[in-house]
């Protein structure tokens, strides 16, 4: 059975501006992500892709996309991927993030989030590492993150 978030994304893909509408809905639910004006370009089980445009709101004093904007994009895509991939009766929460800044982030940034191991249903909680890589429009990797999620059964 497909996760409710994934069903919503798939339903919105049929509409013009469906990616924009989906991102707006996500930012309404989690308003701190609105500061980066994200677009989710792909959401499926075990994969989420999103992007942010290089604009003033995400630019730092040296003209590159600032570190926290990249971290927000990484956390957003990782969280959406996990939420869309979880079996029924499971929940998640981020527990930590390790990041590497690889190059100057200039231009539109494109993130890809994938799990480092299969996402499964379990009777007890478990750690789920999620890998996120962000590339610029030229395809250069500018940022990598490993986000540790805690996946556990919903308490009844």
Image (spheres, helix red, strand yellow):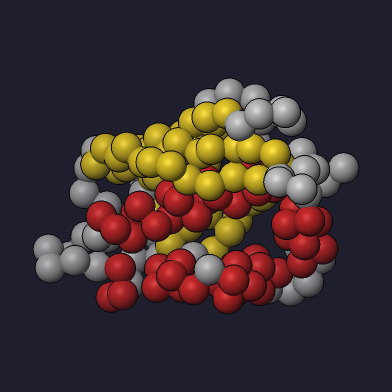
- Tell me the quadrant of the picture where the N terminus can be found: top right
In the rendered image, residue 144, in percent from the top left (x then y), is placed at 35, 38
Q: Nearer the viewer, residue 144 or 125?
A: 125
- Would residue 45 be found to the left or right of residue 40 on screen? right
- Would residue 106 be found to the left or right of residue 131 on screen? left
| Residue occupying image coordinates x 43% and y 70% | 32
In the rendered image, residue 76, in percent from the top left (x then y), is placed at 50, 55
- Looking at the image, the residue that sits furthest to the left is 62
Count of all numbered marks drawn on residues in the image: 0
- Looking at the image, the residue that sits furthest to the front is 156
- Looking at the image, the residue that sits furthest to the right is 1
In the rendered image, residue 36, in percent from the top left (x then y), is placed at 40, 68
In the rendered image, residue 43, in percent from the top left (x then y), is placed at 66, 50
Q: Is residue 25 above or below residue 6?
A: below
- Would residue 141 be found to the left or right of residue 46 on screen? left
- Would residue 128 be found to the left or right of residue 98 on screen? right
Q: Nearer the viewer, residue 13 or 99?
A: 99
| Residue occupying image coordinates x 12% and y 68% | 61
Q: Nearer the viewer, residue 42 or 91?
A: 91
Please tell me in which quadrant of the rendered image residue 16 appears: bottom right
Q: Is residue 97 above or below residue 115?
A: below
- Looking at the image, the residue that sits furthest to the top is 117
| Residue occupying image coordinates x 39% and y 57% | 72
| Residue occupying image coordinates x 60% and y 56% | 41
Query: Is any part of residue 86 visible from this angle?
Result: no
């Amino acid at each position: 059975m497909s996760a409710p978030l994934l069903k919503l994304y798939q339903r919105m893909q049929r509409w013009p501006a469906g990616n924009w509408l989906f991102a707006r809905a996500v930012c309404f639910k989690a308003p701190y992500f609105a500061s980066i004006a994200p677009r989710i370009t792909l959401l499926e089980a075990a994969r989420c892709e999103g992007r942010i445009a290089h604009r003033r709101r995400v630019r730092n004093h040296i003209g590159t996309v600032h570190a926290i904007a990249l971290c927000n994009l990484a956390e957003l895509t990782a969280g959406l991927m996990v939420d869309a991939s979880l079996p029924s009766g499971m929940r998640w929460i981020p527990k930590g993030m390790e990041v590497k800044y690889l190059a100057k982030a200039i231009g539109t940034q494109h993130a890809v989030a994938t799990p480092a191991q299969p996402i499964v249903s379990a009777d007890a909680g478990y750690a789920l590492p999620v890998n996120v890589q962000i590339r610029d429009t030229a395809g250069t990797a500018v940022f990598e993150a490993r986000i540790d999620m805690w996946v556990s059964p919903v308490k009844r």
